[in-house]
Image (cartoon, rainbow, N blue to C red):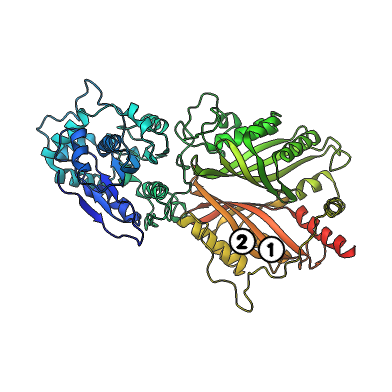
Amino acid sequence: MNAPLQLSGRRSARQTLPLVLLPGTLCDARLFDPLLERLDAPTVLYFALDDSTDAAGSAEIILDQLPPRFALLGFSLGGIVALEIAARAPDRVAGLALIDSNARPFPPGRPSSQADGSETTEQIIDRLWPSYVAKSRQGDGALLAAVRTMAASVGLTAFARQKMIARTRADNRDRLAALSMPALVLAGREDALAPPEMQIEMAERLPDATLALLPGVGHFAPLEAPNEVAAHVSTWLKRLDPFAPFQAKASPQPTTPGGSMNEQSGKGTSPTAKHSGSDSGESGAVLQVERRDFTQLVPSDRPRVQSMRGFDPEYTDIVDYIVRCTHRIWDERDVGLIYTHYTHNCVAYTTLGTMYDRETHIRDTIQRLVEFPDRRGQAIQVIWRGNDVDGFYTSHMTHGLGRHTEFGAWGRPTGRTFCTRTVAECMIIENRIYKEWIVRDNMGPLIQVGVDPHMFATGIAKAKLERGETVLEVSENRRLLGQYPPEAEADLSIAHDAGEEELLGWLHHIYNKRLFGKISEIYAANCQWHGPLMRELYGVAAVLQQTMRLVALVPDCAFVPQHICSVDSEEGGRKYAVRWLMDGHHFGYSSLGAPTGHKLSIMGVTHFHIRDSKIIDEWVVYDELSMLVQIKMAELQNAA
C-alpha cells in the first residue's frame, strides 16, 4: 500500500479529527476533488486501494498508517474497506460515512465486472457507464472523460487487485449493529450498483445512521451531485466534533436545476436530515405534501425511509409523523394521543397566549373540536430540518375549513362557513413534541362568520387583565442604536446554508432597512402572495403594498427572524420557512382603528418558494386579532 496522500493540511487552533478518504474501483484522489472544494476541512488523508487483494488485508495496511482516531469515508469499494476498518477498530473510528456502497457479500456466481483481461481501462469504463451514472447524465461527456482519466491512472494491475477485494469481501450486515459511531449512509436514488434498498438496509442496522438518498443521481454521487454530498458530509462531520472547522462552502455552480438559492450549499445541508428532504416522495424518499392526496401522505404499507429512533412504528418519516398524528388527534378525535406525542411540560407559544403543560393542550383541543365539529385541517406543506439524534423541527402549514354550528367562544352559532390558515412549528424528539409555536389567523374566520372583532377582542382583553396579565411597555426595540441607522447587514447566525443566508439578508433589507424597492428585484413578475384573512394577491405590486401595509401599521418596528429551515421542492427550487417577531408601536391607520401608540408584538411565520433566485410564492401568517387584543388591553389598563 502506498503511503497516504495528504490532500489538505489546514488545522484550526483546536486539534481536529483527520478525515480519511477511500476511493472506489478504478478511482483515484480526483474523485474527491469536488467534495474537498466544497468542504472547509482540516487534515485529509487519502489511501489508494492498490496493494492488497482482500478487504481485511487492505484494512490492516491502512490502520497501521492512521492516527489513533479519525473520521472515515469510503466510496463504493472504499466503503467496503471502510466497513472492515470500522469492524476491526471501532474505538478508533470517530465516524463512518458510506457513499454508494453496500454491506452485502459478493453475489455467488456473478463475475466481477466481467473483464477478461483483454479490455483497456477506457473500454471497461465505457461498458460499465450505463450503470455508473443516472440516466440524465449518460450523455455527460465531461463526466465520462473524468472517470476515464481516473481509470487510466489507476491501471489494469490495480484494477485486478480491486476486483479481488470486491470478490472476497465479507458479509458485513451482521457487524453493523456493533458500529455505534455516528454514520452517514448516502447514495443516489438511481444507483444501479448499490440501489436504495441496500442503503436503507445499512441505515436501519447501524445504531446511529443518517440516511440520504439523492434524487436524479446514480452511482458516482461525489461527481454527479457534489453540492449535496458536501452538505451531508459537512453535517455528519459536525456531529463528530461540533467545534471542528468542517464547513461546506457555497458552490459557484449549481449541480441541480433551480439556481443558487436552491442548492444545499453553505454551512451545511438543509435540512440536516436522516434523509434528504429533496426527494420525490416515492419509496425511499421523505414525503412532500403539495402534490399528494391525504391517503398518499399516510400510507399503510410504506417502509420506513428515515431513521426515526424512538418514534411509533407507523411513522415512516418526519412528514408522515406530523401529518398523520395531527389528523389522528384532530380529525379522528383521538385526543388522548397527546399523552404519547407531547411531553408533560410542553410549552406552546400562540398569538393569543402561552400554554405551559400537556393538560392545557388537551383541554384546548377538546373545546375547539366541540365548538367546530366538522372542522377539517388540510396539510398544505411541511418544511423541516433535523434528525432523530438532535431532534426534528417542522413547520407545518394547514388550511382549516368548517362551519360555525355550536355555541362557544364565538357566541351564538351563525351556521356560516370559514377557512383559515395556520402554521404550527414543532420541536420533536423520540415521538414527542416538547416545544411548539402556533400562528393562526384568528381574525379571518371571525369576520367570515360575522362576529364583531372589536367586541370579541375586548372580551379577551378583559379576561386577560382579570387573570393578572398586563401590557409591558418597552420603549426601545433596538432596531436603531441611539442615533445610528439600522445595521447594514443581517444577523445570519440562525442560517444553515447559503440560500438561507441570502433570504435573511433580503428580509433585513426590506423590513429593517426599509428598502422596499428590493421586492421588485427578488420577486418573480408572476409571483403569488397568500396572506392573512385568506387574501390571495398576484404580482410584485401587490407584494409591495401588503409588505408596506404591515410596516406602516407599526412603523417603528424591528423585524427579528427567530428560526429558518428549508427543503428542496419536488416542484422545482427550494422552500423556506421563517418564524419571526415584529416589535413596535401602533402608530399607523388600519382596520384595527386609528393609531393609539400602544405597544404591539407580532409573531408570524412566512413560507417562501424560491426558484432561479426569485420568490414565486409567499405564504405569510400573522394574527390581526392578537394585535387588536393588545390594543384593547392597553386601553383598558390605561383607563383603570
The residue shown at (25%, 28%) is 170
The residue shown at (55%, 27%) is 314
Mark 2, secondary structure of its residue? strand
Q: Earlier in the sequence, mark 1 or mark 2?
A: 2
Residue 456, numbered circle: none
Mark 1, secondary structure of its residue? strand
Q: From the image, which quarter does the N terminus lie in?
A: top left
Q: Position of residue 210 (x, y in %)?
A: 42, 39
The total number of labels drawn is 2
- Give 60 or 91, whichever is nearer the viewer: 91
Residue 583, numbered circle: 1
Q: Quadrant of residue 434?
A: top right
Q: Quadrant of residue 632?
A: bottom right
Q: Residues within 10 Å of mark 2 (few under 14, many from 20)?
A: many
Q: Residues within 10 Å of mark 1 (few under 14, many from 20)?
A: many
Q: Position of residue 160 (x, y in %)?
A: 13, 34
| Residue kind at label 2, given as amino acid type | Val
> Left or right of 445: which side holds 9?
left
For residue 233, above or below residue 336: below
| Residue kind at label 1, given as amino acid type | Asp
- Give 26 or 428, whichever is nearer the viewer: 428
The residue indicated by pointer 2 is 560
**Labels 1 and 2 touching (C-beta < 8 A):** yes
